[in-house]
Amino acid sequence: MGFLAVLFGGWSPAVLAVIAGTLLGFLAPATAGASSQDRLTRNGVGALIASTLIMLGGQIYDGGFLLKRGLADVAVMSTHPPEVANTAALLAVILGPLCAIGMTWLQNLRNHKLAQRLNLIVLVFFLVAFPFVEQAARLNWLATLIFAEIYVLLALGLNIVVGYAGLLDLGYAAFFAIGAYTTGLLSSPTSTFQVHVNFWLLIWLSAGMAAIFGFLLGAPTLGLRGDYLAIVTLGFGEIVPVAFQQLIHITIKEPFTCWIIPAFQNLFGAQSTVQCITLLNQYNLTLGNKGIKPIDPPVLPIISPNDQGIALIVKIALMVIAVGAIAYLFRRAQVRNQVNSKSNRRAVIGAVVGLVIAIIVFVPIPPLDANAGAISAVANSVLATVQPGAFESARPISWYFLILGLSVLTIFLIRRLKDSRLGRAWMAIREDELAANQMGVNLVRTKLLAFAMGATFSGFAGAFYGAYVSGIFPNVFDFSVSVIVLSAVVLGGLGNLTGVIFGALIIMINDRLVLVQFQNLLNGLQTQVLLPAAANDPALREFIRANLDPVKYRFLLLGLVLVLVMAIRPEGLVPSRERAEELHASEEDKIEEIEAKMKATPDKVDPS
Amino acid sequence: MNFLVAQGVTKTFGGLTAVSKVDFVMEQGMIAGLIGPNGAGKTTFFNMITGVYSVTTGVLTFNDTNIGALKPHDITALGIARTFQNIRLFPAMTVLENVLVGMHTRLHSTLLDTLLKTERMTKEEDMARGKALDMLDYVGLGRQRADWTARHLPYGDQRRLEIARALATEPKLLLLDEPTAGMNQAEASDLTKFIQFIRQDLKLTVLLIEHHMRVVMGISDRVTVLDHGEKIAEGTPHEVQNNQQVIEAYLGSGAGH
C-alpha cells in the first residue's frame, strides 16, 4: 500500500489508508484469539503503522523527492499542488486507524447478525461512495477498475465450470468474444446488420448466445475428463477469435444448383444447364481485424440527459409508478403464497431505495441559478460530482455502476444456483462422477448446464465490454484472457465467490493499474536520470531503453505470483471450505480435534 | 410380475469374460446374498444392474423394463440404488448435501425455478431438507452432524451415510456392496439388524455382496455363489453351505469362519 502511494501520490494516501484500515479491521479478528480489547488496540496500532507508511509513500511521491528532482511529469497525478500531499498525509494518518478501529469494533460485536448486517452496509457504502471519492480526488483509477470488474464477472462465470463442476476450461475467452460480438453485430452502425438493438435487451441476447455456444462446446467434450477436456476447450478458445477474424468473405452457394445437379449432368456426359444460385457472396460479417466500432452505448430507457422541466417530472413520475406497481405486485404475490412478510417488506424497501438512488444518480438535475450565492455554488459542484449522467466514455461513473449492478446480479444468481439441486449436482460430479451418476445425476445434462451457465455470465461481460470500449477486435480475445481469468479463479480460491472476486481484482489492478503506473514512473526516471547519466555508453543506454519496462514482464510477474501462491497457499487466497480441507488432508486430525473442542466449548475456541 | 430377472447375462471386456451366462431372479421383498471368491464377478454383476456397464449378451429386466442398456441415472430413477465396496461419498460436501444429492431424481425444480426462486422451488427445497434430516436420524447418524464435511465422519458413519444417500433415492431395490467391510463384529451385527429393519420398514428388496459369512448367512433368504463369472450354486444359506462345489471354490479362503 505504501508502494502504491509512492506510485500515485496526490490524494491517494488518504484513500489507500482508509481502504487498508478497513480491510485490516475486517480481516484481522479472524486470525487472532486475543480478547476484544487487545484486538482493538492491536489493530489500531497496526493501522497507524500502515497509514504512516502509506503517508510516507505519498510524501515521497509529491512532498519532496520526485518533485524536487523535477520529475513531476513522470506521473499522471502531477496536477496536484504540493499542499494536497500534506492534507492527504494528515487525512491518511487520522482516517486509517479510525477505520481499522471502527471495523474491529464491528467484528467484536456480540450480536453476529447485527455485525454482519453492518458489515454489508459498510461494504455497500464503500462501493457506492468510491467512484465519487475517486473523481473528487482525481485518482484516475476508475477506468481500470471497470476493466477489473469485467474480469470479476468472467471469473465468476468460469468458477461455475471449474470451481463447482470441476471441468477444466482453458478456452473461456471464446464465450467472452461471442458475447461481445453479439453486442457489436447488433448495435453498431458499421455492422452489416444495420440494426440498433437496445443495450438492455442486447445484454440478455448476448448472454443467451454465449450460453448456446456453451452447449455447443460442451457437447463434444462430454465423454472427456481432465486433461483431454482441457485440450478441447483450449482448441475452442483458439478457434473462436480466428473465426471472428476470418468471417469476412463468407460465400454460401446453394448446393443443389451448384454441385449436385451439375454433378449428375456431368455423370451422364451432359453440359451443366442450371444456373448456380449463390446465397451469400463475399459477405463480410465481422470486418476482420478492422473490428466493429463504434458500438452504441446503453441508453436509460426512460430518462435521457436532455430532459428538463415538465418532461423530466412526468418521466420520473412514470418511473415511480412503474417501480411502485412492480413492488406492489411482487408483494401481493408473496402474501398470497404465505412467504414470510419480513422479506416482502424488505423487497419493497429495496425497490424504493433503489429507485431513489437511481433518480439521484442518473436523472440529470439541472444546475441551480449561479447567482443565488454560495449555497447554490456548493450544490452545483455536489451535483456535478454525484451525477454521472449518460453513458459516455469520458464519464466512467455510470459505467462503474452498470458493471457493479451486473456483478451483483451475477453473484446473486450464482449463490442461488450453488444451493440448488443443480448446484449440488455440479459439486457431486466434481467430487465423484461415477457416484453422482449412480445417485441419479444426469451427467450429460448437468455438464452442459455448467458450460452454458458459465458462458452466460461471460456473455454479460462481453456485452458490457463491447458497449464500454465501443469497439471490438478479434485479437482482444486471445488465450491470455482465458489464462488471466483462470489464474484469477485459482489464485483467489476455487469454488469460493469472495475469493474469486478478490483474485480477479488483485490480478487486474496489479496488471492494468499498478504495473502501468510503475512503468510511467520508470519512464520518467529513465528519460530524466538514467539516460543522461549513461550518455557516454550507447550500449548501456540501449539496454536501459529496451529492458526498463515492467509492462513487458507482466506475464512473468503473473507466473511468479501464481507459482508463489500455489507453493505457499495452494488452496488460494480465500479458499472454499472444501478446497482447504482437500489440500491439507494431513491436518485432518487437527481439524477433527478443533471440531471436537468446538462441540465441547462452543464459545471459547476460535477455529483458525 | 417379475421384479429383477437376469437371463444368461454375460459381460466381456475384450477377451476376458467377467460374468458368464448368469441366470438370476429376485422376488420383491427378499434379501438375497451374492458371494464368491475375489474376482468372481460379483461387483461386475452389480455394475450391470446399476448401468455402469452395459450387458454384453443376455437380458436384464427390472419390473419388466429392460435395463440392460439404460444409463445409470435412468436406472436410479426406476428405483435401484446402491452403495460401493470402498466408500464413495462426496467427501468435500456436507453430510446433508450428500443425502440431498441422493434425492436428485425425486426433485423437479428446473434451472429457471432456481434462478427465479419460484415458490415451487423453495417449497421443494424445504421439503427436501426436512426429509434429508429425517433420513439422517433414520439411519442413526443424527441431524446434529448434518453440517459436517462428509470426510470427517468416522468410518462406520460414512457407511451409514452411504446407505442414507442410497435410501434418499427412494429405491425399490437396494444393492449393498460389502456393507460390513472393515467393521468389527459388533458393528457388523448392528448393521445387519439395520438392514433387516429397513427391509421391513421400507418394503425394500435387498441384494448384498458380502464376505462376512456370518452376516450373509444370517440375513439372506437365498444365497447365490459366483466363481470365475459363473453361477455355481444357489439356494438357502443352509444348502449353499453344504454344497461341495462351493466348499471347493472357497477352500483355503476361510469359508467356514
Image (cartoon, rainbow, N blue to C red):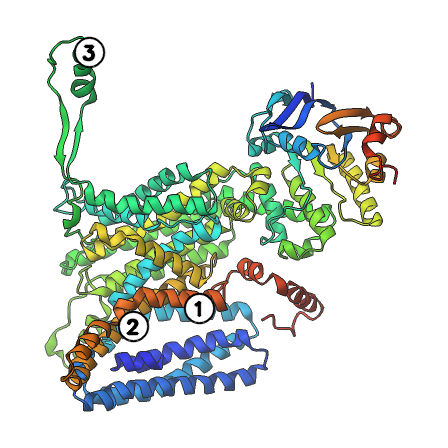
State which quadrant residue B191 falls in. Answer: top right
Q: Secondary structure under badge 3?
A: helix
Asked if marks 1 and 3 touch (Cβ < 8 Å), the reply is no
Q: How many marks?
A: 3
Which sits earlier in the primary sequence, circle 2 or circle 1?
Answer: 2
Q: Looking at the rendering, in which quadrant would you find the N terminus of chain A?
A: bottom left
Q: Between disc 3 and disc 2, whose residue precedes?
A: 3
The kind of secondary structure element at disc 2 is helix
Q: Where residue A15 sits: x, y (%)?
A: 32, 78
Q: What is the spatial separation of the Cα atoms under label 1 and label 3, in whole angstroms?
A: 68 Å
What residue is disc 3 on?
A267
Q: Secondary structure at mark 1?
A: helix
Taking B169 as reference, is A348 above or below it? below
Q: Residues within 10 Å of mark 2 (few under 14, many from 20)?
A: some
Q: Earlier in the sequence, mark 1 or mark 3?
A: 3
What residue lies at 13% left-to-right and 41% top-to-bottom?
Answer: A194
Q: Which mark lies nearer to you, 2 or 1?
A: 1
Q: Which residue is mark 2?
A: A514
Parent chain of label 2: A
For the residues beneath circles 1 and 3, the answer to whether they share a chain is: yes
Label 1: few (<14), some (14–19) or many (≥20) C-alpha neighbours in 10 Å = few
Closer-to-camera residue (A378/B142): B142
Q: Quadrant of residue A584?
A: bottom right
Front disc: 1 or 3: 3
Is residue A94 visible in the rendered structure shown here? no
Asked if residue A6 lies left or right of residue A191, the reply is right
